[in-house]
Amino acid sequence: MIEISQALLDLDSNDALKVMGWPDHHFTSQGLYMTYRCHVLYVNLNIENNRCAGYVAEKRGKTYMKLIALTKENLEKEHICCAISNNKDCQVASKKAWLGDRLDEGLVFLKGDVRGKCFIEYIPAESAWVPVKAPGYMYIDCFWVSGKFKGQGYSSQLLEECIRDSREKGKKGLVVLSSAKKRPFLMDPGYLKYKGFETVDTAEPFYELMYLPFTENVDKPAFMKHVKKPHVDEKGYVAYYTNQCPFTAKYIPILEAAALKNQVPWHSVKIETAEQAQSAPAPFTSFSLFYDGEFVTNEILSEKKFESMIQKKN
């Protein structure tokens, strides 16, 4: 059963009716609740929720955040939320170059008109840099709202816009990489479940593929078989990475230098295309580190953390 919008419950009955365009009659809270549950059988719930939430925000003196979609025309001047610096910074330059090449493939980078981490990035799953089979779905690359922007409803606003856009483009639903419990660089499974996502497939040691179908009886996404048990044949430390995450531009050279200093074998494998990413040995292609063939971590390590790992392995 679909639950009523919290934004709607925050209004008195007359205000709620005005928001939904219903006749100006009085209802008890319970009556309004039941009437609304019947009403959603005939209207798009997301549209109603947006209208209600917007009305509530207006009453409370708040407004929805202005959203900006990156384009080839504004890419240079707009900051990218996950690496706030000038365009000469290696992290910013590498990420913007990667984004620029993906825009023609249907990638959307939608961010708040704020200076901070408040954005969602998604792309048709067929072009996603991830070893997943999800034809007809939209894949969420990254979704990050942090710091003072949390708790303001911005996460919901960004996700709702992604859902609206994906529906409009005829997608079957959304798919995203997560984990059994919250981990660095992966979507929070608790939040995803709260928003209606379900786990549809798993891969060792902790990866979960979650999806939000828009209709019933659609094909389910799945990990490609070769990443169900991440493994490489090479000995020593092997890092697979892309420029999808800007932090790799800074930290891959740092890790390479640390390996050289500590006299341990190191090999970096930069993934350059979606085809290479879909053939990668682990689900998370932005960064995956292996040691003597076995998967170690998806976390982009600092020099200190990497050297601590070396000491433990030795």
Image (cartoon, rainbow, N blue to C red):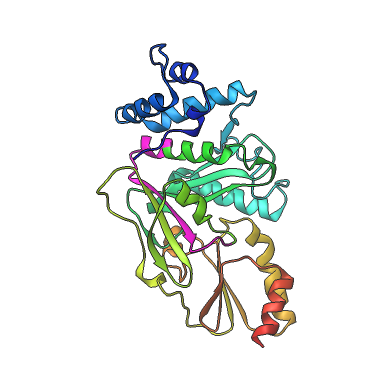
- Identify which residue is drawn at 64% across, 40% down: 76
Toward the top, the furthest residue is 24
The answer to whether 90 is drawn above or below residue 203 in the figure is above
Residue 150: image x %, image y %? 63, 43
Q: Nearer the viewer, residue 199 or 227?
A: 199
| Horizontal relation, residue 155 to residue 114: left or right | left
Whole-percent x and y of residue 243? 58, 58
* Image position of 183 with respect to 17: above or below: below
The residue at the point 68 percent across, 65 percent down is 251
Q: Nearer the viewer, residue 181 or 314?
A: 181
User: Which region shows up in magenta?
Assistant: 164-183
- Decide: is 258 above or below 106: below
- Quadrant in the rendering for residue 202: bottom left
Residue situated furthest bottom in the rendering: 314
- Residue 122 colored magenta? no
- The answer to whether 136 appears left or right of 112 in the picture is left
Please, which residue is most extreme toward the left here?
217
Q: Position of residue 64 (x, y in %)?
A: 58, 29
Measured as percent of width and height from the top left, residue 44 is found at 36, 30
Write the residue at 29% across / 43% down: 215
Q: Is residue 235 left or right of residue 263?
A: left
Question: Where the C terminus falls, by quadrant?
Answer: bottom right
Does the stretch in magenta take in 177? yes
